[in-house]
Image (cartoon, rainbow, N blue to C red):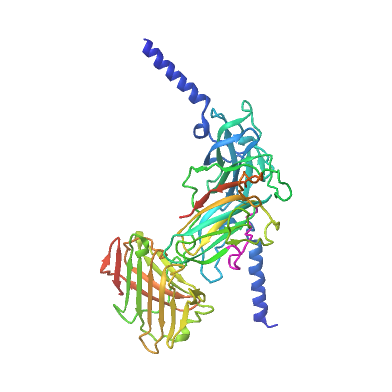
């Protein structure tokens, strides 16, 4: 009986503690005063509003639309000390790209857009926590504890003025740290261009892709020999206006899908020399740094009759490979900016696995 | 003025109008990525909220090139409106051809305590003030293979031996960066 009483007592105690101090993870999420529901963006340990120390949380809206942003603070027992739903610690409709600061109090050295008024029963946070809530989790934030009374004064003007204490609190993002912005746009269109020049016949173009770990060992090789005359002027002016892009498409999921692309911008300096060189029959692009997309070399060789040759070599971690194998048929195109394109299709690869794709053209 | 020229001027004005009508406050995710002055395109490597250049506080970002080739590294800063306040293309906040294994610091200004290789000159965009009281930033480079850290630092104080000086040490706090995939 004594044991049962002890167990019941312990259970009751735990229940009381749980109920009384829900804290940053268990407290129900608020709704902003404009009726929008909040989500948790980040948790902040070590929030202090005591002894002239305040906590400032600075957030930038990374989402493409305006968001409501709030800061909820909790005392040592996990009791929430402000209600975002009434506007206490909330900023509504923060525009994309904007940065705002919500704090437990005003400070002399930092800027605050909103300050929290502690609500009963909380009157001080000597050892608290907080959570950043918002209508979209795509925020980047930093949290500081900061001395509220000191400013940074030049010692030449005031040798006795002490600068403020300032420390980062190391907040933790609850969503995937935070959700990344959309990837940069591919240099390639969603679908292949039409009307591109074709190789001279079956097997007159080839492609080799090696996807390795580490990515530094990734390789891309594409060779193409043409069927129709290609003049040097068809290559445009790679020194001033005509960049090039290699695009790879396959049939993932049964539909034509852009898999990856690599750009070779016009002009520029690669190392100490111009990236592009003029040759008798065309142009050569050489970039030992292999930026931006891993291309080390591109040769554009014109020919008055069939026999124009294009050769692209890429290597390393900059190559934006998106995984192998590819789903046939595969299309590889080299496009010039506002000019011709050269294309080949590959239906029967000799290698197509997680590490290699190798094929000659149809 | 020929009809074609009129059309070109009209198109130019239309494009200018579109640009003006677009979101002014693009911020560190929507603002187009820059090209370095050596014509190399930049990728977005880190984002930081809380970039401060105000009340004698400055922000320093320190990066080490862990790629196998030299990279260009830049720091772009945005004010509280989201306006980009420096030009990497013009060299403000940019370090070109940083060697393998080298470490560089780009700051919003020089500080007495830390070393800066490059400091940013704010342009007149956005709120057009000379401070970032509530800013953000992004580290851009020609490679994702960087490791960086950032700090908010008092620009006027240095650490002196208390046996010989009564001057206080500087305020200094880390600024958390968000690494982008």
Number of numbered discs? 0
Magenta stretch contains residue A160 = no
Return the x and y of residue A158 as percentages of the image width and height.
73, 46
Q: Is residue A302 visible?
A: yes
Q: Main secondary structure of the magenta part?
A: loop
Q: Looking at this view, is A4 or A236 the one in front?
A: A4
Q: Please identify the quadrant where the C terminus of chain A is shown.
A: bottom left
Left or right of residue B48, residue A152 in this image:
right
Going by the picture, which residue comes out furthest to the front? B164
Return the x and y of residue B71 as percentages of the image width and height.
48, 65
Return the x and y of residue A125 as percentages of the image width and height.
60, 31
Left or right of residue A1, residue B118 in this image:
right
Going by the picture, which residue comes out furthest to the right? A157
Q: Looking at this view, is B98 or A301 the one in front?
A: B98
User: Where does the magenta region start and end?
Assistant: B80-93
From this view, report whether residue B84 is shown above or below residue A309: above
């Amino acid at each position: 009986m004594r044991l049962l009483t002890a167990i019941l007592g312990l259970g009751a105690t735990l229940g009381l503690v749980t109920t009384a101090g829900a804290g940053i993870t268990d407290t129900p999420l608020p709704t902003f005063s404009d009726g929008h529901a909040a989500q948790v963006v980040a948790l902040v340990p070590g929030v202090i509003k005591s002894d002239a120390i305040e906590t400032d949380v600075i957030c930038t809206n990374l989402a493409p639309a305006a968001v409501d942003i709030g800061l909820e603070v909790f005392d040592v027992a996990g009791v929430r000390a402000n209600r975002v739903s009434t506007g206490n610690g909330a900023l509504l409709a923060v525009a994309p790209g904007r940065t705002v600061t919500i704090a437990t109090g005003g400070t002399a050295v930092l800027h605050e857009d909103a300050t929290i008024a502690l609500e009963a029963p909380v009157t001080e946070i000597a050892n608290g926590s907080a959570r950043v809530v918002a209508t979209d989790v795509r925020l980047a934030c930093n949290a500081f504890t900061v001395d509220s009374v000191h400013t940074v004064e030049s010692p030449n003007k005031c040798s006795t003025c002490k600068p403020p204490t300032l420390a980062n609190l190391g907040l933790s993002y609850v969503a995937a740290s935070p959700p990344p912005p959309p990837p940069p746009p591919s240099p390639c269109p969603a679908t292949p261009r039409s009307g591109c020049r074709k190789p001279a016949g079956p097997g007159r173009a080839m492609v080799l892709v090696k996807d390795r770990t580490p990515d530094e060992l990734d390789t891309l090789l594409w060779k193409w020999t043409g069927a129709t005359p290609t003049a040097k002027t068809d290559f445009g002016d790679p020194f001033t206006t005509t960049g090039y892009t290699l695009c790879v498409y396959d049939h993932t999921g049964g539909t034509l899908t852009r898999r990856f692309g690599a750009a070779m911008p016009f002009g520029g300096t690669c190392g100490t020399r111009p990236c592009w060189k003029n040759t008798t029959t065309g142009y050569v692009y050489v970039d030992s740094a292999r930026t931006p997309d891993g291309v080390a070399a591109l040769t554009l060789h014109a020919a008055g009759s069939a026999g124009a040759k294009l050769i692209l070599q890429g290597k390393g971690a900059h190559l934006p490979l998106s995984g192998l194998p590819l789903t046939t048929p595969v299309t590889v195109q080299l496009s010039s900016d506002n000019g011709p394109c050269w294309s080949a299709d590959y239906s029967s690869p000799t290698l197509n696995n997680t590490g290699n794709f190798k094929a000659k053209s149809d | 003025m020929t009809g074609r020229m009129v059309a070109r001027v009209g198109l130019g004005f239309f494009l200018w109008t579109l640009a003006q009508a677009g979101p002014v406050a693009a911020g560190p995710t929507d603002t187009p990525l820059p090209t370095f002055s050596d014509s190399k395109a930049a990728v977005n490597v880190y984002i930081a909220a809380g970039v401060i250049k105000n009340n004698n506080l400055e922000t320093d970002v320190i990066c080490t090139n862990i790629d196998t080739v030299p990279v260009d590294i830049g720091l772009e800063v945005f004010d509280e409106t989201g306006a980009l306040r420096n030009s990497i293309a013009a060299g403000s906040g940019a370090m070109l051809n940083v060697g393998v294994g080298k470490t560089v610091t780009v700051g919003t200004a020089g500080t007495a305590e830390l070393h800066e290789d490059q400091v940013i000159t704010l342009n007149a965009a956005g709120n057009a003030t000379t401070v970032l009281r509530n800013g953000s930033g992004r580290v851009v480079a020609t490679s994702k293979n960087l490791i960086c850290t950032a700090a908010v630092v008092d620009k006027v104080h240095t650490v002196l031996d208390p046996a010989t000086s009564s001057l206080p040490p500087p305020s200094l706090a880390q600024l958390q960066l968000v690494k982008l995939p």
